[in-house]
Amino acid sequence: MEERITQRMENLAPAGSMESLHRAVSGGADAVYLGFSAFSARAGAGNFDEEALREAVRYCHLHGVRVHVAVNILVKDRELQEVDRVLQFLEDAGADAVLVQDLGVMDTVLSRHPKLSVHASTQMTIHNLTGASWCRMQGMSRVVLARECSLSEIRKCCEEDIEIEVFGHGALCVCVSGQCLMSSSIGERSGNRGRCAQPCRLPYVFDGKEGAWLSPRDICMREHLGELQDAGVKSVKLEGRLKRPEYVEVVTESYRRGLEAPWRRVPEDEMESLRQMFQRGSLMPGYAMGTEDAGVIDEKHPRHTGIEVGEVLLSQGQMALVRLYRDLDDGDQLCFGMREKAEMTYSGPSGRTGDTVRIRLRPGLQAKKGEKVHRLISQRQLDEAMARPEPVIQVRGRLTAIPGESLRFTVTDGTSEITETGETVQAAEKRALTPDAARGPLMQTGDTPFVFQAEEDLEVETRDAFVPVSLLKEIRRRVLDALEEKRISANTGTWQRRPPRRAGRLRPVYSMEGIRSAIVVRERPGKTSPGSLLIWSPEDYREDRLRASLRGMPEGIWLALPRVCEEDTLQQLRCFILANRRVLGGVVLGSVGQLGMRLDGIPVAAGPGIPVFNHRTADVLKKAGVSFGCVSPELCEEEIRLLMEGSELPLLVPSSGRVQLMLLHHCPARTALGLKKGHRDCRMCDEKAKESLVGRTLTDRKGEAYPLLRQRLPEGCLVRLMAPSQLDLTERVQKNGWIPLHLEGSGDGGKTTTGHFDAGIL
């Protein structure tokens, strides 16, 4: 543990373009993460094609920066061969690691591409020690923890012998990562396929009030880096592959300074710089530091709010008098009263704090006396960010020019050293080469990243020698080219940390023979036909409630675990399962990390929280001892047929009922009340208080109402946002001979739908 505390955390910066990548390296990134042009969870970012990615890896390795490539979407069967080709390309290009969500992709990397380290993407929903342990057993070297983890859970995960990466700054998904179907439900753009349309930033009506009830503030851990370091975190991730290069520069540079002195107080001007660059309403320290409900969500500001720079004193026609709280410069982008379509770019002389300035409003914009003026973009900040020079590599050298011997030039960066020799040196007949004359062309390193900082960094030994300037330039070019290649080679393949793969803990002990359908029930099962497998999905996972509910359950019912929970809760559930193994027929796992549970031979299945997109994922689950899995609702009928043909694992297909679209860590009811603390001990729903979540919905702009269901855990509630209408594909599923999965709400008389996700069946 002492080594973890003293070792500086990695500053991991985003790179959505080559320009952003250069800004990340300039800002002091230790590593960058980027997307290839295929199979990245940010399809809207400026992802890299093959040529650009090779260039990016070379540039980063030249400067000692690692490159992590996101291959973190769910992959269809027909794409598996292309994924393998992409992974081979990344391996050949020298990428240091790949981030993965899909278990089939994970298995492909681990079994076929040994030079690539594998990082569990946050899309894999790893959120506790059991999950981190399972990732290590598979051979992964790092886990990007779910952004909802508390500091205590992060600390527990860091006890495992695997690198832990946490999100430190930027935008958050409101839904538990990897568990969101909202975008594909609304606009057929799957977040699990890299095409999220961000419906979380749209307005919804809750309890009669319109607001962005699904829009989290941006996270900022700049003031809490010391706590993360003490917890044992290896890497701090900065979000922003869709952000402008200046954002990457400013945020990366700020966190570099913070990581060098994580306990030092952050200067206010630095925090203001971060707020100016991007914030929604205000920055928050995130779930890790105990932010809850109304502290997470700012329903009034789903977009960048910048910072206040002044107040309107007077407005007449197209002119406004504004008293400045902060400096104002030509080119700044302003917004009056944070009203929609009340933005403009200021053009005029600079004003300073305390000044009253006259602002000419753009056509159609009206200012109101007393309203605040926010600066969304500071032109000075952007200019300063882009003016920061590219990083340089300091070198030292020695030139030896002795008549009768070969010209010899040695250059070192302190680690790598290169020596090149040239033609035999001739004696000078007239003017001999002097040290100063040699230094001139040798120190002109041009557009290379290498610099001799001072004359004493370049020694010259010469004795009445004659060396043409052209030869000096030629040997300089060869030395620096060779040093560049040596640095790149030295920094390629040196950070891989592949734990050995180990066998999973689960054992296949259950046969699906004779099972014709699976039915998810809440607290009490209804009448079912012969050959039905019942899966109990409790609303309340507190131990006393589980015991009480189990008394009314038929023998052989399967218990569905929550998709996320703290480690202590998972271990309590394990004890409950073992104590009631005579009644329970098996356990349906809620997320990937739960594959690491020790259940002593009790049958297990992979629930909808472990979506099966391809037969290779099914193979991984079968080898892990899973008895059956669930087809992703984002696959179309043809894709399911292809999956079934290649899978030896029995798979259930969603057939009827309401689909869970989101899993939320904040409660809209508590958020609407302005509550920022007390989430764990809240009892509003237990007591059926008027203000509770019971019976509530979110209604979108089209009038569709999304039911909100709570899922109570010992650590507090999760909120399940359900589809506004029911799925009804029973006939289609039965026609194909698939085992139907009847979800909650099946047969309750709700409206049915045959809409679909990402060209899928739903």
Image (cartoon, rainbow, N blue to C red):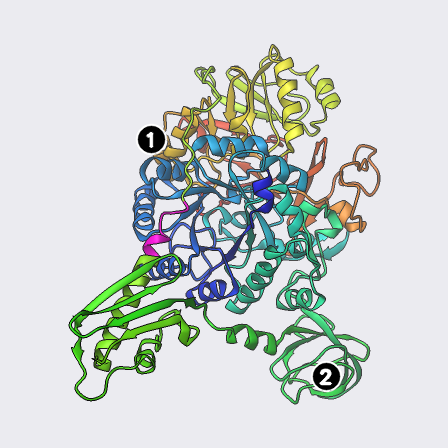
- Relative image position of residue 294 (x, y in whole percent): 75, 51
Magenta region, main secondary structure: loop
Quarter of the image where the N terminus is located:
top right
1 and 2 marks in contact (CB < 8 Å): no
| Image quadrant in which you'd find residue 719 | top right
Q: Residue at x 42, y 38 (%)?
A: 613
Magenta stretch holds residue 101: no
Which stretch did the figure color magenta?
488-495
Q: What residue would you read off at disc 2?
A: 352
- The residue sitting at 55% across, 21% down in the picture is 598
Residue at 68% x, 17% y is: 550
Look at mark 1 in the image and give the residue it sits on: 646
Q: CA distance from mark 1 to mark 2?
A: 68 Å
Look at the picture and state if 309 lies above or below 430.
above
Question: The residue under label 1 is which amino acid type?
Answer: Gly
Residue 292 versus residue 6: which sits nearer the camera?
6
Q: Amino acid type of disc 2? A: Arg
Going 64% across and 51% down the picture, which residue do you hit? Answer: 225
